[in-house]
Amino acid sequence: MKKSNIGIIQILPTRVFRIYRGGYLLEKFRGIKNPQDSDYPEDWIISTVKAIQPYGISDESISKIKSIEGIDNLEVLIKHFSEDILGKGYVKKFGDSLNLLVKLLDSSIRLPLQTHPSKIFSRKYLNSDFGKAEAWYVLATRKMGKEKPYVLIGFKSGITKNMMQKMVKKQDIEGMISFMHKVEVKPGDAIFVAPGIPHAIGEGIFMIETQEPTDFTILLEKNIGKHILKEKDCHIGLGWDKALDIFDYQGHSLPEVNEKYRMKKEILSSNRVGKLFRLNGGEYMKSCFEMMLMEDAKDIEISFEGRFASIVITRGEGIISTNVGDFEVKEGETYMLPASIGKHKYIATKENLSVVISLPPIFSTI
């Protein structure tokens, strides 16, 4: 295997404006003094995607990195070292664009009711090979008001597109919410949101969100916090008739929702040197990305089968030992591991390591 010339890439905080507020728990995780909520509640930690903003398309969402050979931007670094970072097979098949987007996200208000398109819809109407399937791994929560931390996800029985059109036109938010399931969440919970599934992240949730690399979102609400959106921003220029076709109107009971959308935590290895798990959200998730958890790692060796990876150190302090040297890491830091780094070790020093790993689908290197 060709050795990497650049080693592990440290991703620096890359805060992105959103139409909701948050960020307190994110800043606390990052070790920022006097953390607070703001209009920048997200940190795009593996991104070459430009954000769709009320003020236009913005490159503020391109991940910033610790300088390597004078380069401090992930997109530029990948263009200089595409085969090294993404893998020779990947570049041959997909070029030098990432097929993965990973964020840290912290909400202080409920996010707007929404859904996202599938790959098929995006190819037909949005000139993109990617939809916006997403997976949530909850890192921490805070109680905001009387509500316990929750997400809204999936429809109850009885909803139709025609009913939704009427509620959207009237902006009957309570009516729309009444057809959705409220699911309480806690740290360590993991949920996969397939395209078309209605959802909204509740207030007080800090998570890692792994997703397809787009910013396509259909918003059912025009008034979000202090922002009033134009209709075209809500339906991303599709018109409501076409945008509402994206939703999956199939109804489920609450037990069915919990079984269908909560990811299964599958043990890959568990011994005295640590535990390794795969988060299984089903076949569609596997076609988009993969997520793994490392817990209480003292000395774990692993290989990602020639794939690049997003690495979030969620607890502990130690080193990642690679074929090009050792890299000190600690809680609150984020990294990208190039594909050219094969087998490597996570070695705890002061405290056992816990890590959340996001990967492109395994067929990407074929």
Image (cartoon, rainbow, N blue to C red):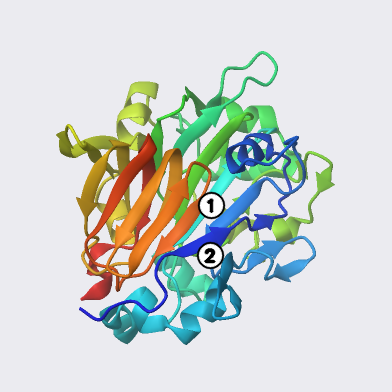
Q: Position of residue 82 (x, y in %)?
A: 41, 82
Residue drawn at (70%, 70%) of the image: 57
Q: Which mark is residue 103?
A: 1
Q: For the residue marked with disc 2, what is the amino acid?
A: Ser
Q: Position of residue 10 (x, y in %)?
A: 50, 61
Residue drawn at (65%, 45%) of the image: 220
Residue drawn at (57%, 57%) of the image: 44
Other residues around mark 2 within 10 Å, as few (<14) / some (14–19) / many (≥20): many
Q: Quadrant of residue 144?
A: top right
Left or right: 330 in relation to 2: right
Query: Quick one: label 1 or label 2, which is nearer the N terminus?
Result: 2
Outermost residue toward the top in this view: 146
Q: Quadrant of residue 123?
A: bottom left
| Marks 1/2: CA–CA distance | 8 Å
Task: Tell me, yes or no, if residue 72 can be seen here.
Answer: yes
**In this view, 78 is above or below 277:** below
**In this view, 291 is above or below 76:** above
Q: Position of residue 283 (x, y in %)?
A: 24, 52
Residue behind mark 2:
47
CB-based contact (under 8 Å), mark 1 and mark 2: yes
Task: Tell me, yes or no, if residue 246 can be seen here.
Answer: no
Q: Quadrant of the N terminus?
A: bottom left
Q: Position of residue 142 (x, y in %)?
A: 61, 23
Q: For the residue marked with disc 1, what is the amino acid?
A: Lys
